[in-house]
């Protein structure tokens, strides 16, 4: 583990489950309930990471209802950047905020790959999320061919810089208010069973932190930004990932669809918190 002893105080450890296009309303409610019950069965007084459940739009209300009074937060998987209008099929930020959704995934690789998301549209959505008090989880990451061509660092840099364009240091790290979370998700490791080795995932997350430091030169905010890793995260990899200096949590796909798979990942985040308290 690295020597950054201020991490526990400055930035959250976050375990987020992206349920993608899975679960009916009743199934999503049952999964959320199982997670809440699993957490309740743990010893009292244990520090937990920030837990974020991201169901489909039609399941948001049910999941919000099931997690009331629990440590779990709820996030949306996407949103439009506009407040309202003739945009059939889209969901506006004020709608999410009114439901008391707290997080929103922005620029997930599947949105970029299949639905035409660009760095510019990601930037518009990040701005809109912040304007409405939602915490954007801005996703960045390279394709397999980009990694094989040695372009990982350039691609990630471009995505981070473009995504944060015209967003002030005060917005990204204001105390007690909306913050920006970054998720590094190498596209070649998502849903493939392939895992980016922890030291390499940590290197890229460290690169992202360095880019933020450069972007907000002199503002000293990079150490307060939570950076997650996403890409076939599972129980067998979480402990090593959570021991890395620059990985502050996980954006989990397939392993978030069953409580028995997701709860061990939450425990992995809790171990990270415990290691800080003993530092």
Image (cartoon, rainbow, N blue to C red):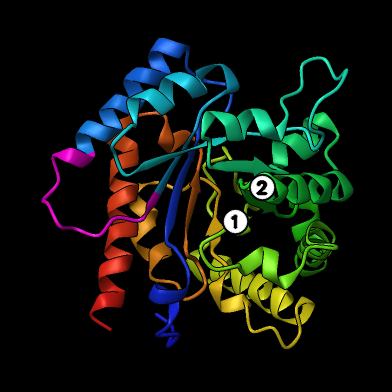
Near mark 2 (Cα within 10 A), the count class, few <14, some 14-19 or many ≥20, is many
Q: Which residue is painted at 60% across and 56% down in the image?
A: 178
Task: Provide residue 179's location: percent of width, then percent of height.
Answer: 60, 59
Count of labels shown?
Answer: 2
Which quarter of the figure is the N terminus placed in? bottom left
Tell me the magenta residue range: 39-50
Q: Is residue 44 magenta?
A: yes
Which quarter of the figure is the C terminus placed in? bottom left
Residue 83 visible at all: yes
Q: Which residue is painted at 84% across and 62% down in the image?
A: 165
From this view, report whether residue 20 is shown above or below residue 223: above
Residue 143 visible at all: no
SS type, badge 2: helix
Q: Which numbered dot is residue 251?
A: none
Q: Identify the main secondary structure in magenta.
A: loop
From this view, report whether residue 91 is shown above or below residue 14: above
From this view, report whether residue 41 is shown above or below residue 214: above
Location of residue 214 by image quarter: bottom right
SS type, badge 1: loop
Q: Nearer the viewer, residue 39 or 175?
A: 175
Location of residue 227 by image quarter: bottom right
Q: Is residue 224 left or right of residue 37?
A: right
Residue annotated with mark 1: 178
Q: Nearer the viewer, mark 1 or mark 2?
A: 1
């Amino acid at each position: 583990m690295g020597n950054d002893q201020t991490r526990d105080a400055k930035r959250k450890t976050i375990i987020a489950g992206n349920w993608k296009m899975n679960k009916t309303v009743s199934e999503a409610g049952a999964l959320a309930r199982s997670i809440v019950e699993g957490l309740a069965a743990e010893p009292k007084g244990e520090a937990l990471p920030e837990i974020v459940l991201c169901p489909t739009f039609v399941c948001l209300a049910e999941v919000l209802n099931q997690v009331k009074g629990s440590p779990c937060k709820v996030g949306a998987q996407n949103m439009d950047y506009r407040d309202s209008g003739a945009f059939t099929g889209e969901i506006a930020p004020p709608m999410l905020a009114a439901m008391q959704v707290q997080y929103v995934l922005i620029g997930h690789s599947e949105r970029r790959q299949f639905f035409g998301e660009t760095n510019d549209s990601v930037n518009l959505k990040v701005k809109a999320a912040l304007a409405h008090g939602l915490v954007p989880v801005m996703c960045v990451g390279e394709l397999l061919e980009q990694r094989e061509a040695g372009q990982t660092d350039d691609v990630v840099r471009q995505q981070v810089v473009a995504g944060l364009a015209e967003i002030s240091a005060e917005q990204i790290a204001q105390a007690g208010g909306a913050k920006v979370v970054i998720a590094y998700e190498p596209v070649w490791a998502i849903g493939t069973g392939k895992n980016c080795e922890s030291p390499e995932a940590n290197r890229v997350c460290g690169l992202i932190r360095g880019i933020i430091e450069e972007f907000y030169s002199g503002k000293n905010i990079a150490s307060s930004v939570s950076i997650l890793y996403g890409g076939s995260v599972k129980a067998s990899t979480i402990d090593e990932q959570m021991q890395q200096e620059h990985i502050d949590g996980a954006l989990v796909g397939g392993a978030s669809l069953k409580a028995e798979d997701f709860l061990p990942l939450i425990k992995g985040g809790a171990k990270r918190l415990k290691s800080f308290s003993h530092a």
